[in-house]
Image: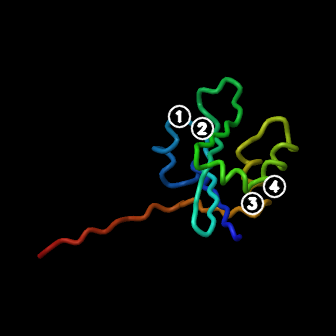
Amino acid sequence: MSTKRSFIQVSKAWYANTALATDCERFDITVEGVDWSSQFTVSWPRNSLSRSAELVVLDDGWKALANCNDLIVKVGTGAATLSPQELREHLLTCGFQDETDHDQVRCSTVTAN
C-alpha cells in the first residue's frame, strides 16, 4: 500500500498570525493512503512552562501515527528536548513532503457590468 506523508509548519505559513493563537509553533502532520487520510499535531504551546513539544492525536490520527515509526524512532533517540528546527529536519530526513503554503492565494472577484 502506498502512502503519502507530508507536513505543514504553521509558523512559516502565510496564515500563521491567526492560526497560532495559543501555540508558539505547530506542525500539522498528515498521512494519506489510497482511500484514507489522517493527521496528528506536534506543537509548542505558549503557556507551557517547560517549553516542551506536545503530541496531539485525535481519533482518526492514530492511523497516521502508526505509519510514522521511523519518525518516532528519530525523535525518541534524539536530544532530550525537541526543537521545531529538529522536528522539521527529522520530517525531511524521513521523506515527508513540506506542504507549507507560504504565499497567500488572492481571490479575485467578478463584477457584473
Q: On the rendered structure, is 78 left or right of 100?
A: right
Q: Which residue is mark 3?
A: 92
Amino acid marked by disc 1:
Thr
Q: Secondary structure at mark 1?
A: loop
The residue wearing badge 2 is 24
First-in-chain label (3 vs 1)? 1
Residue type of the residue flagged with mark 4: Asp
- Residue at 67 percent of width and 62 percent of height: 5
**SS class, disc 2:** strand
Mark before the other along the chain sequence, 4 or 3:
4
Residue at the extreme left of the image, as rendered: 113
Q: Which residue is mark 1?
A: 22
* Picture layout, residue 106 above or below residue 40: below
Answer above or below: position of 68 versus 53. Answer: below
Q: Position of residue 91 (x, y in %)?
A: 74, 56
How far separated are the C-alphas under marks 3 and 1? 26 Å
Front one among 30 and 52: 30
> Could you tell which of marks 2 and 4 lies nearer the N-terminus?
2
The kind of residue on which mark 3 rests is Leu
What is the number of the mark on residue 91? Answer: none
Q: Earlier in the sequence, mark 1 or mark 4?
A: 1
Density class for disc 1 (Cα within 10 Å; few <14, some 14-19, many ≥20) is few
Depth check, front residue: 2 or 8: 2
Disc 4: which residue = 70
Real-space Cα distance between discs 1 and 4? Answer: 29 Å
Badge 4 element:
helix
Q: Picture coordinates of residue 72 (x, y %)?
A: 79, 48
